[in-house]
């Protein structure tokens, strides 16, 4: 189950952060997302990656906590997507597919003429769409 | 890791026992220890001490007919025993003379050997007999050797001779001994391992404890042999069996059982991790560790001792972190190109110790949490259980505890009940200060993360530390750490995280009694963009409380804070500068509507206030301060500042002082208890608020006019008052180079009284560059092309001599400084209508166009304010004359100059004018007036260089024609010629003829005594040489048709040699002549040869004489008179004019 999704802007500022637990660890999820930015920074700034992965937007598993797994994704406009899941056995393909959908939703949200680029995303329809994507995530997707 | 016994932490080292010959023990021990792999020695000085090797009575439990369950898994001292007391090899050292000599000694040796044999009986410990010989020659007989071998019951190769007589022998013997020991150790440990393995294989033990113990032992023996892979295999096996046992064993009470299992698991896992990490298999080690953690995480045990579990769990992380840190195995970078994907399931941090330190700290916090709960619930338990037993000590088995009961002299060790154990563990745990341990762990993690550039993780660790300090009531340290964390969250705009931290900070401020800080943190919290998502009630925000509800509460509390404590009359003052986080509480933008304003006229400005506080508040008093205190104003009408909305106030200020008027601060007084002093900001340069920058809200402008919001400035330029003074600069046409040119300056007051007036003069090259001198000539004194000489015509200077150098004159009351291009002169007090004038005297050294800038600065009245008037004038500097010169010889006189011939041959040589020695050389100097004004020429002279009074006169100068009367006036464009004759007296290859000085004045009628200016024109260097031959043609000035006249060609030989010349005369149809056409002649030294011809002209007019050519044979030089010299005017008849009157004009 996905417990938290986040969109992080250029200044590493949160643009959208939604947790789906409803319990008291929402702040902890904030911390997890914030700390994952360190790993993104390191992966993006380290040029040791091979040529085939240069244009890769999916950043992979960022931060293993014992209870969560954190995955990252970097768009071409250097906006970061972060996802925290409680499923400890996740397939890469599922995560990639999730991020693709999320990216599409994000693109639609920022294409809204009333959205100011660089500001927080407050669109309700975006939230609803993200909720749908999050609910559909899981092992059943691969079947 | 330091808590582990040393034998567990280090790899085991084989042990060899030496006995007998104590003097050899040290060299042998040292040698064995330095071997690779090293061998430890147990040195027994004599055979009587060998009893330490005796084994205690404990038989293999499985070999007994009815196997009893073991009381523990591993014995505490087993490993130590094998490292220090149970040798793999026992070496008995005998001296050769002991064996071969006295029979009593032999018997003793036999007894010692027997003893040793009995001690190691039943073990596979090897016996080695070493015969020590002092000399190689000291051979023992074969019989003795055999007897000894039989006694010892050993192979012949286990009987070693040790020769120690010299260094090389000793070294050889030591090497032999070491290799034998190494081999025997290997065999011993292999056999021991095999023996135990056979036990496992033979009978599957009903007790898993024994299986674990055996696996552990096999692994240790394998480690002795450095067979790491086997060791790893059996440790893994032991670990597996142990994990299975956790659910089945019933031997001990459940709590203690779990403690024992975890302790053993910890040790085995430590061994596995160490082996993997030292083998460089960091990936496997990490994977193994994660599995270990996963396996044991749920094995918490009973809730009353869950703190033991978390302590143990935290220790796992700590130990693994320390292992990672100490082993140099670096994180795999080449093996896995990308972390976090299916290729490599790990992320970067799992290879960093910091990650594990941080988790260790987290679990230690968990432990403390559980411990606190257990301590609380302990009081509910019956008292008999809560009493901890007095003397609890570790039992002989690892991970078990026992109670020591003393009854008289008898000490008995009794097992503990679980209740007793819990009480004991609680009592032990409460003695420790966990928070310092937690802080230390966070600190290590924080430092490590920082060094890897993971700022946010480091920040999280700092937050952990700060929370711990807060929990332990150390608010000073806590506040300091929270502040650094808050800075990070502020910078990146993570409002919910910042909210939590500020909540702690606010509480710290409150507890430390820092009113200002408490207020500041509270206000910052109230102005944070945290909004409801519906879950806030359940989130643990620490002391901050749920965000959405408390923002309003906090604001209310803070704004009414001081009113409640009315005993403290001092209002709280907060400074908000350009980087303060409190800008979101109150942001002040000040914009003047214009960029500049006249003095004493009104400038309007807009003061805009913005607050992000959630509730509307009232500002009782607003004070606006400027850099000119006269302009400060305040508004005491209550102003209501609404959330997120600019409050715009327009005000007018009037400044009487010129210069910059800048708004500095705006102070807002709220509720009489809070004064916020904001630095005023220009809307044009205003930075966004970091916390509200990303909020999706409507953008508003601080001023009504959006353009002013983009360009408005908090400062305005107040102009100077208009000058009421006339400053006039006059000039009369262009200046001429050399003269002192005067520019009159007139100052007339037309309204202002001039106080402290100061006139500044500046000369600047009109073509730019500002340089009035050429760069190459800067070091010369008169290098300035244009020079400000002085300022004349001042009223008090009238009587002074104008030529005195005024730049060096100093007056006590008047400022006067004159440099080459700059001058300052003070202007006296001038009342309205009064005037003052002066003349600027400027001299041009070169023709140049110059801008003269004159500025007058003064105080118009009593006000300390200066007014400046500027004027400028461009003045052209011109050369008065164009001067030229020409050298000539006298008419019809031609000296032969050798240098002229040379220059004909080689024309590339520098051409220098040659003058003939002691001949009259003519120089014609022409001067042309190239100005627009008529000039008076006073004189023209040739002045020798270096003055006329030189001792040796090099040449004579005679003015042949020049200025006839005192002053010759000549109009623009007119040319004047002066003719001079120069007679050099000395032959010299380079002679300076000096300069032509032309003295002139301006032809002006209004000046009585016009100043005479000298313009100089230098003559070139000439070459003076003695002509070897001088030819002169003597001819009458005119001829008359049909009238014969004589023509003489006189050639003078000036040399001491006989000169031969050839001469010829061409034919002419206008003349007939008598004399030789072509002839040669020889001229004696110093003599003159005269060629005489008689001519009769035929026709009148200007006639060309027949062409005369004279050739010097010696110099191969041909002399041909010029056409002018060969021309004569022939009158048709005798002219009728008076020769006396015009003779001077004819003879040139």
Image: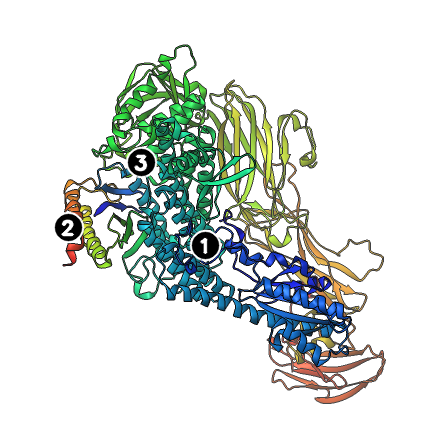
Parent chain of label 3: B
Q: What element carries label 1?
A: helix
Residue pictured at 64% horizontal, 59% vertical? B50
* Mark 1, other Cα within 10 Å: few <14 / some 14–19 / many ≥20: many
Name the residue beneath numbered marker 1: B324
> Quarter holding the C terminus of chain B?
bottom right
How crowded pointer 2 is (Cα within 10 Å; few <14, some 14-19, many 20+) is rated as some
Q: Are marks 3 and 1 in contact (CB under 8 Å)?
A: no
Where residue B500 sits: x, y (%)?
A: 34, 33
| Label disc, if present, on residue B905 of the rendered structure | none
Q: Which colour scheme is used?
A: rainbow
**Nearer to us in this view, B800 or B119:** B119
Q: Which numbered marker is on residue B495?
A: 3
Q: Residue A136 carries which label?
A: 2
Give the alpha-carbon distance from disc 2 to disc 1, as whole Å: 40 Å
Note whether residue B685 is visible.
no
Query: In the displayed structure, would residue B789 be above or below residue B810?
Result: below
Name of the residue lying farthest toward the front = B65
- For label 3, the SS is helix
Q: Which of marks 2 and 3 is in front?
A: 2
Residue B609 in the image: above or below residue B239: above
**Residue closer to the observer: B149 or B737:** B149
Residue B166 left/right relative to A37: right
> If you read the primary sequence from the N terminus, does the residue marked by circle 3 or circle 1 appear first?
1
User: Can residue B102 be seen at all in this image of the molecule?
Assistant: yes
In depth, the one of B642 and B592 nearer the eye is B642
Q: In this view, does B463 lie to the left or right of B20?
A: left
- Give how far across and how far down residue A51 sits, in percent: 33, 65
Task: Please report contact status of discs 2 and 3: CB closer than 8 Å, yes or no.
Answer: no
């Amino acid at each position: 189950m996905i417990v938290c999704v986040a969109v992080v802007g250029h200044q590493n500022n949160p643009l959208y952060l939604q947790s789906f637990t409803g319990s008291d660890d929402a702040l902890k999820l904030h911390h997890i997302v914030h700390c994952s930015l360190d790993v993104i920074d390191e992966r993006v700034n380290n040029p040791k990656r091979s040529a085939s992965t240069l244009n890769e937007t999916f950043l992979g598993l960022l931060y293993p906590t014992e209870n969560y797994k954190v995955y990252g994704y970097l768009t071409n406009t250097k906006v970061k997507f972060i996802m925290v899941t409680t499923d400890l056995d996740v397939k890469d393909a599922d995560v990639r597919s999730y991020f693709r959908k999320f990216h599409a939703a994000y693109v639609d949200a920022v294409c809204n003429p009333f959205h100011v680029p660089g500001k927080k995303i407050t669109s309700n329809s975006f939230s609803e769409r993200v909720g749908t994507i999050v609910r559909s995530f899981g092992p059943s997707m691969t079947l | 890791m330091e808590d582990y016994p040393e034998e567990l932490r280090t790899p085991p080292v084989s042990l060899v026992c030496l006995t007998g010959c104590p003097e050899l023990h040290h060299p042998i021990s040292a040698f064995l220890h330095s071997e690779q792999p090293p061998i430890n020695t147990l040195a027994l000085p004599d055979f009587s001490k060998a009893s330490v090797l005796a084994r205690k009575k404990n038989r293999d439990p499985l070999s007994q007919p009815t196997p009893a369950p073991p009381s523990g898994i591993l014995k505490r001292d087993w490993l130590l025993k094998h490292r220090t007391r149970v040798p793999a090899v026992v070496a008995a050292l005998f001296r050769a003379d002991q064996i071969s000599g006295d029979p009593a000694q032999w018997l003793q040796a036999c007894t010692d050997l027997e003893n040793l044999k009995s001690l190691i009986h039943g073990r596979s410990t090897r016996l080695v007999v070493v015969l020590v010989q002092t000399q190689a020659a000291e051979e023992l007989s074969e019989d003795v050797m055999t007897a000894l071998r039989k006694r010892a019951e050993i192979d012949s190769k286990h009987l070693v001779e040790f020769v120690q007589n010299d260094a090389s022998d000793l070294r050889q013997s030591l090497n032999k001994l070491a290799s034998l020991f190494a081999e025997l150790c290997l065999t011993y440990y292999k056999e021991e391992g095999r023996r135990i393995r056979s036990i496992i294989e033979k009978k599957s033990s009903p007790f898993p404890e024994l299986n674990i113990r055996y696996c552990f032992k096999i692994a240790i023996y394998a480690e002795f042999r450095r067979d790491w892979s086997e060791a790893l295999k059996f440790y893994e096996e032991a670990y597996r069996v142990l994990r299975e046992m956790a659910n089945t064993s019933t031997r001990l009470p459940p709590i203690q059982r779990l403690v024992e299992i975890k302790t053993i698991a910890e040790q085995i896992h430590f061994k596995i991790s160490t082996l993997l990490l030292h083998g460089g298999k960091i990936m496997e080690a990490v994977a193994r560790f994660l599995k270990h953690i996963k396996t044991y995480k749920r094995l918490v045990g009973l809730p009353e001792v869950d703190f033991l579990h978390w302590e143990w769990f935290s220790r796992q992380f700590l130990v693994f972190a320390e292992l990672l840190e100490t082993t140099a195995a670096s994180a795999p970078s080449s093996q896995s190109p990308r972390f976090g994907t299916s290729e490599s399931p790990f992320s970067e941090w799992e290879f960093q110790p910091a990650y594990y330190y941080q988790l260790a700290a987290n679990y230690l916090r968990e432990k403390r949490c559980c411990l606190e709960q257990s301590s609380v619930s302990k009081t509910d338990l019956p008292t008999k259980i809560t009493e901890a037993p007095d003397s609890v000590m570790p039992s002989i088995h690892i991970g078990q505890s026992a109670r020591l009961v003393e009854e008289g002299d008898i000490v008995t060790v009794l097992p503990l009940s679980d209740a007793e154990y819990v009480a004991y563990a609680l009592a032990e745990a409460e003695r420790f200060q966990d928070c310092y341990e937690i802080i230390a762990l966070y600190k290590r993690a924080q430092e490590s993360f920082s060094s890897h550039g993971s700022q946010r993780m480091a920040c999280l660790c700092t937050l952990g530390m700060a929370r711990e300090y807060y929990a332990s009531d150390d608010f000073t340290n806590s506040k300091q750490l929270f502040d650094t964390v808050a800075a990070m969250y502020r910078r990146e705009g993570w409002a919910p995280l910042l909210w939590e931290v500020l909540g702690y900070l606010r509480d710290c401020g409150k507890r430390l009694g820092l009113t200002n800080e408490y207020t500041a943190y509270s206000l910052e919290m109230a102005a944070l963009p945290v909004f409801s998502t519906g879950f806030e009630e359940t989130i643990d925000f620490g002391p901050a409380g749920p965000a959405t509800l408390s923002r309003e509460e906090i604001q209310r509390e803070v704004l009414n804070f001081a009113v409640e404590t009315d005993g403290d009359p001092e209002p709280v003052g907060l400074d908000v500068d350009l980087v303060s986080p409190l800008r979101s509480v109150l942001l002040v933008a000040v914009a003047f509507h214009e960029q500049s304003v006249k003095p004493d006229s009104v400038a309007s400005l807009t003061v805009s206030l913005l607050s992000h506080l959630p509730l509307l508040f009232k500002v009782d008093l607003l004070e606006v301060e400027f850099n000119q205190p006269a302009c400060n104003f305040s508004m005491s009408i209550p102003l209501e500042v609404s959330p997120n909305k600019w409050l715009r106030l327009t005000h007018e200020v009037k400044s009487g002082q010129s210069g910059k008027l800048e708004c500095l601060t705006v102070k807002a007084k709220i509720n009489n208890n809070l004064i916020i002093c904001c630095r005023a900001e220009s809307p044009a340069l205003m930075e966004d608020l970091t916390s509200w920058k990303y909020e999706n809200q409507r953008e508003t402008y601080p001023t009504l006019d959006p353009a002013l919001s983009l360009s408005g400035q908090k400062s305005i330029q107040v102009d100077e008052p208009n000058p009421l003074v006339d400053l006039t600069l006059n000039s009369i046409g262009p200046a001429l180079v050399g003269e002192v040119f005067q520019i009159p300056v007139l100052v007339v007051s037309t309204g202002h009284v001039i106080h402290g007036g100061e006139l500044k003069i500046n000369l600047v090259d009109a073509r730019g560059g500002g340089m009035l001198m050429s760069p190459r000539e800067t070091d010369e004194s008169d290098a300035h092309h244009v020079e400000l000489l002085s300022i004349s015509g001042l009223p008090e200077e009238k009587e002074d001599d104008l030529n005195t150098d005024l730049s060096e004159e100093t007056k006590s009351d008047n400022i006067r400084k004159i440099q080459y291009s700059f001058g300052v002169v003070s202007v006296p007090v001038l009342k309205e209508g009064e005037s003052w004038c002066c003349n600027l005297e400027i001299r041009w050294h070169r023709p140049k166009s110059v801008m003269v800038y004159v500025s007058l600065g003064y105080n118009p009245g009593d006000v300390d304010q200066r007014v400046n008037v500027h004027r400028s004038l461009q003045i052209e500097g011109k050369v008065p004359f164009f001067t030229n010169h020409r050298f000539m010889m006298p008419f019809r006189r031609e000296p032969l100059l050798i240098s002229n011939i040379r220059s004909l041959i080689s024309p590339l040589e520098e051409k220098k004018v040659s003058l003939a020695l002691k001949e009259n050389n003519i120089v014609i100097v022409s001067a042309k007036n190239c100005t627009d004004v008529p000039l008076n020429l006073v004189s023209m002279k040739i002045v020798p260089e270096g003055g006329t009074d030189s001792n040796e006169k090099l040449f004579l100068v005679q003015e042949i024609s020049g200025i006839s009367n005192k002053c010759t006036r000549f109009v623009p464009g007119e040319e004047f010629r002066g003719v001079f004759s120069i007679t050099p007296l000395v032959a010299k290859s380079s002679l300076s003829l000096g300069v032509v000085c032309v003295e002139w004045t301006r032809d002006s009628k209004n000046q009585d005594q016009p100043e005479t200016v000298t313009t100089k024109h230098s003559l070139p260097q000439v070459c003076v040489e003695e002509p070897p031959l001088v030819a002169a043609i003597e001819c009458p000035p005119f001829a008359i048709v049909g009238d014969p006249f004589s023509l003489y060609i006189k050639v003078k030989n000036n040399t001491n040699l006989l000169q031969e010349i050839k001469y010829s005369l061409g034919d002419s149809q206008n003349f007939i002549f008598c004399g030789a056409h072509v002839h040669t002649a020889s001229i004696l030294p110093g003599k003159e040869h005269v060629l005489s011809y008689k001519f009769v002209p035929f026709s009148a007019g200007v006639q060309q004489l027949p062409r005369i050519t004279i050739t010097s044979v010696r110099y191969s030089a041909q002399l041909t008179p010029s056409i002018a010299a060969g021309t004569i005017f022939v009158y048709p008849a005798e002219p009728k004019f008076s020769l006396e009157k015009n003779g001077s004009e004819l003879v040139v």
